[in-house]
Image (cartoon, rainbow, N blue to C red):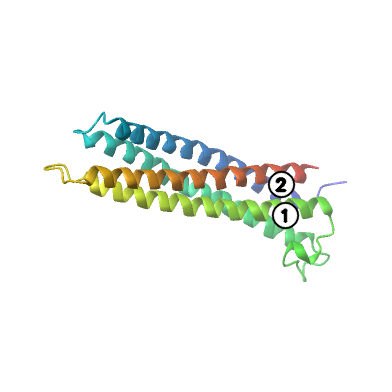
């Protein structure tokens, strides 16, 4: 028996979300590496007189985060769209689509996949929000690092605080992204059954 066309579309969208999640994971890890280098350097006092190096690390991290944002948004969009398509097409009648998985999706496997997709979409959105917060802290650090000569008292400490805050937000983003990616994988496995 031929498979229903909507299931193929849903699986394809979820598969694409996996790809976007994988790219975002790499970019977030790279940005974290840049922040870790800058913070280690600040902590060891190695570049006390060279804020250009800190600026370079922060700028590289910012570029990676700028690239990760649309990847996370695409993943969230794809899983949410896949969930909506599945809800509409799994209904007994297209004229009366299911509004949520609580409307008793008849297939237990599909119900599980939809639950994973819903959670994955939320987590991808939360990861994107945390990336935005991280970028805001980085922007603040970069503004402070534009003050080259003469160095103002306390600027180094403020840069350190902004970078620590950026790193904390990035760690949260990575947690959301990783959990969301696992949920997408789990949903895809259920959809392949």
33 on left or right of 87: left
- CA gap between label 2 and label 1 equals 7 Å
Decide which of 68, 42 is in the foreground and name it.
42
Q: Quadrant of the C terminus?
A: top right
x 27%, y 44%: residue: 157
- Kindly indicate the quadrant of the structure image that contains residue 45: top left
Q: Is residue 55 left or right of residue 187?
A: left
Q: Is residue 38 above or below residue 101?
A: above
Q: Name the residue at 30% across, 51% down.
A: 140
In the image, 73: left or right of 110? left
Q: Nearer the viewer, residue 62 or 23?
A: 62
In front of the other: 60 or 70 = 60
The residue where tag 2 is placed is: 187
The one nearer the camera, 136 or 45, is 45
Counting residues from the start of the chain, the first of labels 2 and 1 encountered is 1
Q: Which mark is residue 114?
A: 1
């Amino acid at each position: 028996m031929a498979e229903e066309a909507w299931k193929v579309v849903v699986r394809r969208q979820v598969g694409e979300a996996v790809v976007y999640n994988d790219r975002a994971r790499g970019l977030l890890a790279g940005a974290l590496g840049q922040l870790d280098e800058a913070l280690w350097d600040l902590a060891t006092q190695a570049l006390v007189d060279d804020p250009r190096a800190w600026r370079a690390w922060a700028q590289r991290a910012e570029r990676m985060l700028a690239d990760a944002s649309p990847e996370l948004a695409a993943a969230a969009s794809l899983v949410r769209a896949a969930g909506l398509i599945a809800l509409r097409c799994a209904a007994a009648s297209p004229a009366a689509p299911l509004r949520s998985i609580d409307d008793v999706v008849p297939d237990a496997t599909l119900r599980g996949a939809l639950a994973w997709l819903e959670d994955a979409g939320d987590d991808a959105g939360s990861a994107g929000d945390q990336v935005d917060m991280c970028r805001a802290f980085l922007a603040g650090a970069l503004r402070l690092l534009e003050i080259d000569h003469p160095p103002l008292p306390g600027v180094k400490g403020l840069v350190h605080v902004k970078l620590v805050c950026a790193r904390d937000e990035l760690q949260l983003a990575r947690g959301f992204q990783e959990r969301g990616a696992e949920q997408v994988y789990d949903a895809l496995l259920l959809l392949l059954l």
